Amino acid sequence: MDVSAQYDVIVVGGGPAGSTVSTLVRKRGHRVLQLEKETFPRYQIGESLLPSTVHGIAHLLGVSDELKKAAFTIKHGGTFKWGANPEPWTFDFAVSRRMPGATGYAYQVERMKFDQILLDNARRHGVEVRENSDVLDVLKAEDGRVRGVRYRDSEGREHEVGSRFVVDASGNTGGLYKKSGAKREYSPFFRNLALFGYFNGGKRLPKPNSGNIFTCTFEHGWFWYIPLSPELTSVGAVVNRDSASLVQGDPEKAMESFIAACPLIAEKLSEATRVTEGPYGELRVRKDWSYSNTKFWAPGMALVGDAACFVDPVFSSGVHLATYSGLLAARSLNSCLDGSVDETSAFEEFEARYRLEYGRFYEFLVGFYDMHHSEDSYFWQARKISNTADSDLQSFVELIGGVSSDEFADTARARQRFSEASDEMAGMTHTAAGDADGPHGAVPGKVVGRLMEQSAALQARALLGDEAGAERPVRQGGLAASTDGLGWVPGARS
Ligand code: FAD
């Protein structure tokens, strides 16, 4: 057995949660091993992203340009045939003051490409990534603390590797989370089943909404219709438990009958053909029951992404929660590894923020599934849950854009400061190198220009440092994010 290699952190899983935490810990110089069972690119569902991932986490990870180059479909918002209104209604992320201008959109992504970009980025940052490596168990010290993993490589050899922390980012199918002592509690409310496949030649909504996710209810549940490219559309029917028997047996027939029962989807697919070959060629079935674990960490171990919790996919929150929890876990790991915060405080902060964000989506979705309301009533509910001074519509868009947490408000404030700094600098005479100092004394003009162009909220916070102002802790006595966004500091205000 190979027990000689020692790491600060071992991350299990190469999905968005795993690659976020591995990269952000590595960015602080720690030794990180990331183990992925499959060989990438591998198929995964979860293709409709939120602005928080595209404009917050992606910038922090340093993959914004690559995402741009990948030319994913731009998603300005969502179009819903849902609730009491018989007509489809549309929301646009750009109405939010927290997602101004260039940050008011997200992407629809082929996960094979998106997850590959994130995993390659982790490698580029110095994370040791091993694919085809199936983690079989976690290792524990005599006192019960997690101290590493046992995994099987592509040749069937087993290895034991030690580390100071293990992060379980293995998604919804693994059982590693049990080693933390956590139990999985399933929601009695969201117990659906999804049947999904891919079509070429599906119609698009009229511009400017052609990249939107289209969501449409029908007698058994609801459909998603996600334009992945000009040709390719991801189409899925989410049906409730009572209709699940219709899917069993012949998924082809079930899909045809569901489409026929939903005239708006049938019309969009009237000239389309289902993809029947390659990774998109099969109809897949997933139970998408929502769950949350009783705890998200134990000494030496943290759970992120679907390994910790999952909530109904209607608002495309999965990748947001996965990457956001990856960021939170990275802050806790970095703070423990550099000795600035004790493990209990660091991981209690991680779990509190993660539960708060998960809870916001969960609570809102319970009300959203009540079909008797109009969209105005859903917008009002979002404001009640987010507890903001924004308008109902803004609260709704911020909640489902993944930016309603206060830390995004703080980064928006930082961006605003950034914007003012940039405007003030616009008329200044730059040095030959273009490095005139900004009004706050230390911000090079060309750097400001580049970051403004990218609308990088989190980078703005990192660059402005103390100028961005201290982050507000999200709970009494809690910790605040450090100015580079990668660690915790004791809260400045509570
Ligand atoms: P994953 O993406 O599942 O990655 C986990 C990785 O760990 C995998 O690569 C796996 O191979 C690896 N792994 C597993 N076990 C081991 C092991 N033992 N050793 C090593 N590696 C291992 N989310 C959205 O944001 N938008 C959507 O539109 C959306 N639609 C959805 C529709 C449905 C029907 C469902 C069920 C989910 C949807 N989601 C959506 C949710 C989304 O799929 C997940 O939330 C997201 O993929 C979670 O990311 P993750 O990194 O936690 O896990």
Image (tube, rainbow, N blue to C red):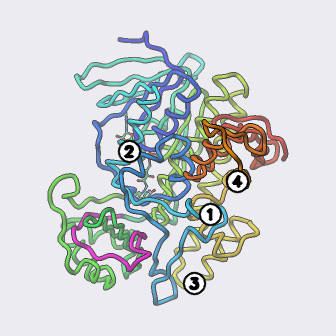
Q: Which mark is residue 427?
A: 4
Nearest the camera: 146 or 281? Answer: 281
Given this view, does label 3 or label 2 mark the residue nearer the observer? 2
What type is the residue that disc 4 sits on? Answer: Gly
Q: Which mark is residue 373?
A: 3
Question: Which x, y percent locates residue 118?
Answer: 42, 41
Given this view, does label 4 or label 2 mark the residue nearer the observer? 4
The crowding category of the residue bearing disc 3, from other C-alpha atoms within 10 Å (few below 14, some 14 to 19, many at least 20), is some
Which mark sits nearer the N-terminus, 3 or 1? Answer: 1
Residues marked 4 and 2 touching at CB (< 8 Å): no
Q: CA distance from mark 1 to mark 2?
A: 27 Å
Reading the image, the residue beneath label 2 is 115
What type is the residue that disc 3 sits on? Answer: His
Q: Is residue 258 left or right of residue 384?
A: left
Q: CA distance from mark 3 to mark 1?
A: 29 Å
Q: Is residue 296 left or right of residue 409?
A: left
- Quadrant for residue 102, please give it: bottom right
- Residue beneath the point at 54% across and 45% down: 59
Tell me the magenta residue range. Answer: 194-214
Question: Which x, y percent locates residue 380?
Answer: 67, 77
Residues marked 1 and 2 touching at CB (< 8 Å): no
Which mark sits nearer the N-terminus, 3 or 4? Answer: 3
The crowding category of the residue bearing disc 2, from other C-alpha atoms within 10 Å (few below 14, some 14 to 19, many at least 20), is many
Given this view, does label 3 or label 4 mark the residue nearer the observer? 4
Nearest the camera: 179 or 61? Answer: 61
Reading the image, the residue beneath label 1 is 100
What type is the residue that disc 2 sits on? Answer: Asp
Nearest the camera: 274 or 469? Answer: 469
Question: Which x, y percent locates residue 325?
Answer: 56, 44
**Label 4's element?**
loop
Which mark sits nearer the N-terminus, 3 or 2? Answer: 2
